[in-house]
């Protein structure tokens, strides 16, 4: 049976920063594919272009050249407003430093993607509370995120990333600010909660301890995907 | 999102407090200084408020009510002869020195009114009767003047207390006795001296040696004739200057003597410049403090704004959120500032100094300026947020 069509596809993507002699190529003819229903990890040494690749496929950064396609739609030709609308409808983010707004309650933080989409406040409250219950934070909705532990804050971030049921979940170093056990639990939660036949999860990480949660692992080097490993158990050492 | 935007602002109490300090101080300075300005300016045409008549006739050279040019007594008769005049009465107005029983001298504003009609008499007498002005050497004095000219009395415990002048007390005007027969309540004047009312003829006696003592002719039009129409007729027939007596800053007409007085003081004194500087200072301080604080608030929240942007919020939504935050802070700052201005004003009004008139128009102007400051602050933040790269959220 042939492989399913990729949900995300990058073809010969270039991205550079600076100009003249100071120009640095972050991506050089990079190809990348991620399938619906899978959790793929992007690994590689610092400066290899992981974050740039993540930004390009999230539509927050424009490639200089090449094709970027997500769910059958070319992103490289879209205008700023269309890209913003695409992110609003299709993307969820889990950030390394959580990026939870400290002056809002836990519930309000989770409501943000829904409110951006135009959901009513009542609907947003209902869905945020349900999502917080799923990540085990029922009863903590009204408190500030700063009152939670690092692991709990990342669970709030996961709830925020999934509450609007995005088709693409992007996780940037989701465990780097957490201890080993908490990191494992958070990664397991990302894997369990985001598992859906229509959803694609891309995780950028340096943390080899969480490789086992991946369906596939793409190794990057010098702005390119060096290899894609289909069996993560064969990669038990740090990639960097 | 707008409610969350407000919660973001109100959740950062330190920043909010700093913002409110800047905005409320600005609103306070602008409202309070404007109110004192309008209060002082309202004192400049106090005689128009205290002496009620629909039309005031003066020498042609008069520009403001405190600078009366003497006219001939016969001008009263000439004015009376103008068609449309119901009655016309003489008025004397001058600054004099009063010699008190203790030998001190104080400046007073002497007002001489017609003894037959008492036209121009104070509306409120707290003590005495106006008719007693027909008795020899009698005067009315205003409440504030009664205190100012009062005598100091040492109490048995050593404290010194001022006993205000009252009915029966005397002082001297130009070596002539002035016996108080009543105390009136009038608005205080820019010139600072108390008002002393007497009859027109006695005012002539008090100012013995002055050839012309007629300052104004007070006139009332017949029914069906407007003050402005009558002014035209008086000027055409007598060659004198005729003024209407509206004292409301916002509705007075071109012919109002109060209006002419207001603008004379505006042009010829440093009052507008002085208070204008204070108001501008309030504006700049507000812009500086709240602009800087709001910018700092935006900077601190920039990564959250970037995250919200990455999640799909457009720059327009973020700009509206910032605008709402700034305007909410502006409204709160306005409320606090104007509240403080009102409280200070209440104390000022109770003390009678300095004058304080808080017009609704001043409130509206202050609100507009404070919201303008907020808008400036928001614009600074909007530029920053519009430029923030959503990809920056991936750079921890």
Image: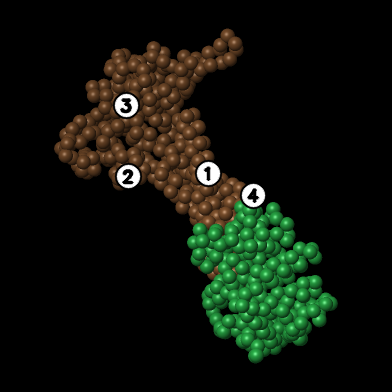
Say which residue label 3 marks.
B123
- Please report the residue visible at 36 percent of the width from the left and 43 percent of the height from the top: B249
The chain carrying label 3 is: B
The colour with which the image depicts chain A is: green
Which residue lies most toward the bottom here?
A2
Say which residue label 4 marks.
B14
The answer to whether one can see residue A9 in this image is yes
Expressed as whole percent of the image width and height from the top left, the position of residue A55 reads 66, 76
Name which of mark 3 and mark 2 comes first in the sequence: 3
Q: Find out whether the residues at labels 1 and 2 contact each other: C-beta distance under 8 Å.
A: no
Determine if marks 4 and 1 fall on one subunit.
yes
The colour with which the image depicts chain B is: brown
The chain carrying label 2 is: B
Expressed as whole percent of the image width and height from the top left, the position of residue B11 reads 61, 52
Name which of mark 4 and mark 1 comes first in the sequence: 4
Q: Secondary structure at mark 4?
A: helix
Left or right position of A71 against B207: right
Crowd rating for badge 4 (residues with CA inside 10 Å; few <14, some 14–19, many 20+): few
Determine if marks 3 and 2 fall on one subunit.
yes
Say which residue label 2 marks.
B251
The chain carrying label 1 is: B
Which residue lies most toward the right here?
A237
Expressed as whole percent of the image width and height from the top left, the position of residue B39 reads 44, 38
Of tags 1 and 3, which is closer to the observer?
1
Of tags 4 and 1, which is closer to the observer?
4
Say which residue label 1 marks.
B336
Task: For marks 1 and 3, give the CA distance.
Answer: 37 Å
Task: For marks 4 and 1, give the CA distance.
Answer: 17 Å
Name which of mark 1 and mark 2 comes first in the sequence: 2
Crowd rating for badge 2 (residues with CA inside 10 Å; few <14, some 14–19, many 20+): few
Q: Secondary structure at mark 1?
A: helix
């Amino acid at each position: 049976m042939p492989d399913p069509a990729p949900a995300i596809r990058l073809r010969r993507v270039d991205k550079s920063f600076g100009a003249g002699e100071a120009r640095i190529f972050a991506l050089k003819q990079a190809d990348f594919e991620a399938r619906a229903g899978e959790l793929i990890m992007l690994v590689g040494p610092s400066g290899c272009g992981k974050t740039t690749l993540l930004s390009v496929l999230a539509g927050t950064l424009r490639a200089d050249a090449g094709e970027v396609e997500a769910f059958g739609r070319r992103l490289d030709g879209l205008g700023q407003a269309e890209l913003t609308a695409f992110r609003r409808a299709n993307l969820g983010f889990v950030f390394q430093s959580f990026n939870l707004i400290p002056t809002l309650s836990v519930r309000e933080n989770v409501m943000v993607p829904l409110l951006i989409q135009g959901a009513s406040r009542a609907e947003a409250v209902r869905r945020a509370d349900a999502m917080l219950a799923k990540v085990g934070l029922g009863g903590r909705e009204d408190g500030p995120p700063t009152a939670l532990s690092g692991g709990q804050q990342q669970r709030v971030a996961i709830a925020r990333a999934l509450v609007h049921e995005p088709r693409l979940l992007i996780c940037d170093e989701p465990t780097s600010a957490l201890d080993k056990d908490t990191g494992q639990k958070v990664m397991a939660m990302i894997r369990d909660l985001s598992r859906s036949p229509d959803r694609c999860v891309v995780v950028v990480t340096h943390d080899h301890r969480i490789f086992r949660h991946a369906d596939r692992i793409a190794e990057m080097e010098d702005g390119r995907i060096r290899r894609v490993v289909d069996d993560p158990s064969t990669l038990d050492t740090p990639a960097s | 999102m707008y409610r969350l935007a407000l919660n973001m602002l109100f959740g950062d109490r330190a920043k909010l407090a700093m913002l409110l300090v800047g905005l409320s101080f600005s609103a306070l300075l602008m409202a309070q200084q404007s109110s004192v300005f309008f209060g002082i300016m309202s004192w400049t045409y106090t005689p128009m408020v205290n002496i009620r008549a629909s039309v005031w006739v003066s020498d042609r050279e008069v520009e403001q009510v405190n600078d009366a040019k003497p006219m001939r007594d016969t001008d009263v008769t000439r004015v009376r002869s103008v068609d449309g005049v119901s009655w016309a009465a003489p008025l004397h107005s001058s600054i004099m020195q009063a010699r008190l029983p203790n030998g001190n001298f104080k400046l007073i504003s002497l007002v001489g009114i017609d003894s037959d009609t008492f036209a121009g008499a104070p509306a409120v007498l707290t003590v005495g009767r106006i008719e007693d002005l027909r008795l020899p050497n009698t005067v009315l004095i205003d409440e504030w003047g009664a205190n100012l000219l009062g005598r100091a009395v040492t109490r048995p415990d050593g404290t010194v207390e001022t006993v205000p002048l009252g009915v029966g007390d005397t002082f001297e005007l130009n070596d002539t006795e002035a016996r108080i027969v009543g105390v009136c309540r009038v608005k205080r004047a820019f010139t600072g001296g108390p008002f002393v009312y007497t009859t027109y003829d006695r005012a002539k006696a008090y100012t013995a040696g002055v050839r012309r003592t007629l300052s104004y002719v007070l006139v009332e039009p017949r029914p069906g004739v407007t003050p402005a129409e009558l002014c035209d007729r008086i000027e055409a027939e007598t060659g004198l200057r005729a003024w209407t007596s509206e004292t409301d800053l916002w509705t007075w007409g071109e012919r109002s003597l109060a209006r002419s007085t207001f603008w004379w003081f505006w042009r010829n004194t440093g009052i507008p410049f002085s208070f204008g500087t204070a108001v501008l200072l309030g504006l700049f301080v507000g812009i500086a403090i709240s602009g800087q604080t709001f910018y700092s608030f935006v900077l601190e929240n920039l990564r959250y704004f970037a995250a919200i942007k990455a999640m799909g919020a457009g720059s327009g939504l973020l700009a509206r959120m910032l605008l709402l935050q700034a305007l909410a802070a502006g409204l709160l700052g306005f409320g606090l500032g104007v509240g403080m201005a009102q409280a200070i004003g209440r104390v000022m009004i109770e003390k009678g100094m300095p004058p304080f008139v808080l017009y609704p128009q001043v409130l509206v102007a202050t609100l507009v300026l404070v919201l303008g400051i907020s808008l400036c602050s928001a614009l600074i933040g909007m530029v920053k947020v519009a430029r923030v790269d959503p990809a920056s959220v991936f750079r921890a």
